[in-house]
Amino acid sequence: MGGTGKETAGHRVFPEKGGNRYRFFCDLSGMAVYTTPPLRLPDGGNELAAAWAMARPHFNHCPRCGRWVSDLLFHPAAGACVACAPWEDPPRFCPRCGAPVRENEQTCRACGMDLRDLGGEENAVSEIPENGR
Amino acid sequence: MLFLKYRKMDADCAFGPDAMRRVKVCPGCGAAVSAGKRRCPVCGARLPGETVYQAWISRQPRCGSCCAPVSPADHYCPHCGARLPAAAPGEKKPC
């Protein structure tokens, strides 16, 4: 599971006759992202771990803040949630040192900061990469 | 049936600001609902007026000069170059 932050997204348990359903929510928006089928593990196995194994592919982990977020609140070009990598225009100034940034520049000429992960809709890819999950 | 609806909505999810403007989240059950709806089609709860984008932007740190959303880690606004003040707990957002 993720090395930063919580081990699973926020969740609620819905007991049913056939077992417990687990519903996992986006940590930023509160959106229900995945609901498991009823689970009942023999010998008191770790039900939450089994449920999370099913839900995990539907979430994106932000390596900066540790949140588990839905695709909607994940910036795939930056590999981070939109709280850590806000969506808007491409940067015109380096956010670390304030130096002006030329169009399509990938690193800041003043401080060397990598500018590729700062977002901007132009930087977004059209599909979620497999390793973005 | 209710859970099948969740799976369908998950498959429909996209990303980016335009997609965030098209969706609301039901405060009752967490369902992703089209921004035009007033009631949740899953649980019937009244939906908030704000979309996912509006909810996100209202919580995001903003540049005091140009109001662009910025990352908590930024020292300068990437959009206008203004120096960003260190975040103070409970500080009122200028935008």
Image: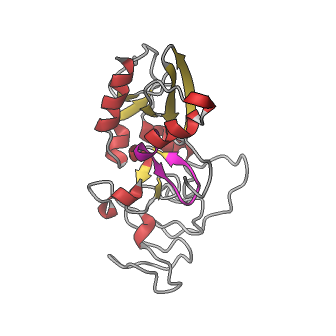
Residue at left offset 36%, top offset 47%: B17
Extreme residue toward the left, this view: A126
The single residue placed furthest to the front in the displayed view is: A43
User: Is there any visible trace of residue A88 in the rendered image?
Assistant: no
In this rendering, the answer to whether B28 lies above or below B32 is above
- Pick the residue in front: A86 or A100: A86
Choose between A13 and A31: the one closer to the eye.
A13
Quadrant containing the N terminus of chain B is top left
Please say whether residue A100 is visible from this viewpoint.
yes
Which residue is rendered at x = 33% and y = 42% of the image? B19
Q: Is residue A104 left or right of residue A63?
A: left
Q: Which residue, as the protein is rendered here, is positioned at the far right?
A: B89
Q: Is residue A63 magenta?
A: yes
Residues drawn in magenta: A55-68
A49 in magenta? no
Query: How far across and how far down the image is residue B35, in percent?
Result: 35, 29
* In this picture, residue A31 sits left or right of residue A15: left
**Residue A22: % across, % down:** 51, 29
Q: Looking at the image, which is closer to me, A109 or B67? A: A109
